[in-house]
Image (cartoon, rainbow, N blue to C red):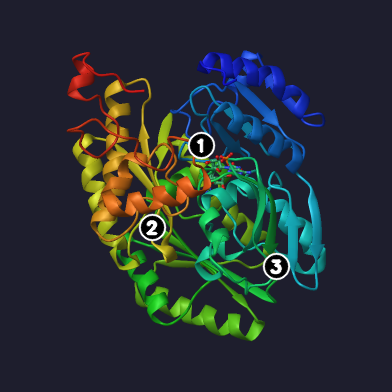
Amino acid sequence: MPIASLSDRIAEFKRRVVELVPHGECIVGDAPALSSYGADGLIRFRQTPEVVVLAKSTEEVRAVVSLCAELGIPFVGRGSGTGLSGGAVPPAHGVVIAASAMKGIVEIDPVDRIAVVEPGVANLVVSERSAPLGLYYAPDPSSQSVCSIGGNVAENSGGAHCLKYGFTTNHVLAVEVVLPDGSVEVLGGESPFEPGLDLRSSFVGSEGTLGIVTKVWLRLLSRPEAVRTLVADFDSVESAGAAVSAIIAAGIVPAAIEMMDALAIEACEKAVAAGYSLDAAAALIVEVDGSQEEVDALYEEVKTACITCGTTKIREAADQAERSRIWLGRKAAFAAAGRLAPAYIVQDGVVPRTALSSILGRIQELANQVGLRVANVFHAGDGNLHPLVLYNPDSTQESEAAEKLATEIVELCVEIGGSITGEHGVGLEKACSMAAMFDDGDLEAMQRLRVAFDSQGIANPGKVFPTPRLCGDAPGRYRAHALELSGEAVRF
Ligand SMILES: Cc1cc2nc3c(=O)[nH]c(=O)nc-3n(C[C@H](O)[C@H](O)[C@H](O)COP(=O)(O)OP(=O)(O)OC[C@H]3O[C@@H](n4cnc5c(N)ncnc54)[C@H](O)[C@@H]3O)c2cc1C
């Protein structure tokens, strides 16, 4: 006999879920604890879940998802909650299935160079545990000491070294997943020659909308023989951008090329004193790796490109300690923005590399128009921008202007041939901007794939895709429709 109302179904869920998780933990009815799972790193979106399940095994995840499917209760997978697009925010009247208690490294195979890990393992732990074997896991988000492999898979996360080595999707051989109907499947395999449709790649980057990742087979790489790193200062972002183009045009693919503008440099210096020049208008961090001979040759070519483009100073990392200090500054950049303003929006967009200099000028113009400051720190080699829009949250006017500016910046990226996201995902934040990038046919095709995995629409609903809009709505960030304002229609 079906249970009719949503509140009855939720009550039934709460009664039955506890016995399905004998080894993990269920949080039911503890308001403060539930509330701590209400948001991710983008705290302006928040929704308290009905229940949080800290599962310990695939079987526990399977049992909980099956109960969600039986009762039609929406759920969201969660890793470490460092996401920056609201992807892990619970759906209304939904359940959080957190993988943070599944932290096992199942196996590290040094011969085939594969690590098999549970989804709650932190990214950096994979490299730390592989290090004694001379191996490491290449994708390196700045949040890598905290963020989980499950979250990395869901977001197809990137990092400074993805320019040369590729994003998460290039390093995930297979995933074990619990699909929204409660079935368990392995997508992909240890061999790179799996026949049939590549469903693994559909899952990577699907932001929790196709099911829950419960185990991941990761490709490991040999540690390079040599690494050299420099910081090149420039007196304009244009000349730093020109150096990026010159390096790539010379046929060099460095392990990383990162750019910071003056405001970002100031923030990083205030936070960690990495030794960056406070008088530079822009700085590039360039790293090359490989065999000693190759690295020495490439390093000289990189230096030449920087000099040709007018670098004002080159700082060369003398040893591993200095290299770590240089990276510490860059990886602290998002958190460091808190030294510049009480609040900021971390934006994520992509432009063609050749448009780097011009888009920074356009961003500055847009910021000037509304009287806000924007610090820029980005993966320059990939054209992946991270404008940090600074504002005062006590001012409603500034908060609204900041949100509007952040949206305008990503839509500008699309206008000049880029993308609304490089690595932080669409989540809740950018669902409205999907229409700026994809037409109805594209969105329809993606929805069909989603529905093939999740016919009930219970896996992380409301994320990635624009929700059905009222007739006459304009694409863009949510604003109340005229019919809502007049009380004739209600958004739910
Ligand atoms: C300071 C800082 C720096 C950052 N730097 C980078 C960077 O350099 N590069 C980058 O790409 N990102 C970066 N991020 C963003 C974030 O760390 C990544 O998106 C990361 O992959 C999220 O992992 P998580 O475990 O925290 O996932 P969560 O935030 O918990 O979840 C993120 C998404 O993944 C889904 N999800 C999580 N676990 C699972 C699972 N087991 N199964 C199915 N779906 C799941 C969630 O539903 C959600 O949609 C940064 C964030 C911060 C705060």
Horizontal and vertical percent position of residue 396: 30, 21
Tell me what residue is drawn at x 74 percent, y 23 percent. 18
The residue carrying mark 2 is 282
User: Dividing the image into 4 quarters, which one contains the N terminus?
Assistant: top right
Tell me what residue is drawn at x 38 percent, y 45 percent. 375
The residue carrying mark 1 is 460
| Residue type, mark 2 in image | Ala
| Residue type, mark 1 in image | Asn
| Residue type, mark 3 in image | Glu
451 or 43, which is in the foreground? 451
231 in relation to 377, above or below: below
197 in relation to 117, above or below: below
Instruction: Name the residue furthest front.
Output: 1
Horizontal and vertical percent position of residue 342: 43, 28
At mark 2, the secondary structure is strand
156 or 134, which is in the foreground? 156
The residue carrying mark 3 is 190
Task: Please state the quadrant of the image where ligand 1 appears.
Answer: top right
Q: Quadrant of the rendered structure where residue 45 is?
A: top left
Crowdedness near tag 2: few (<14), some (14–19) or many (≥20) residues, C-alpha within 10 Å: many
Distance from mark 1 CB to nearest ligand 1 atom below 8 Å = yes
At mark 1, the secondary structure is loop
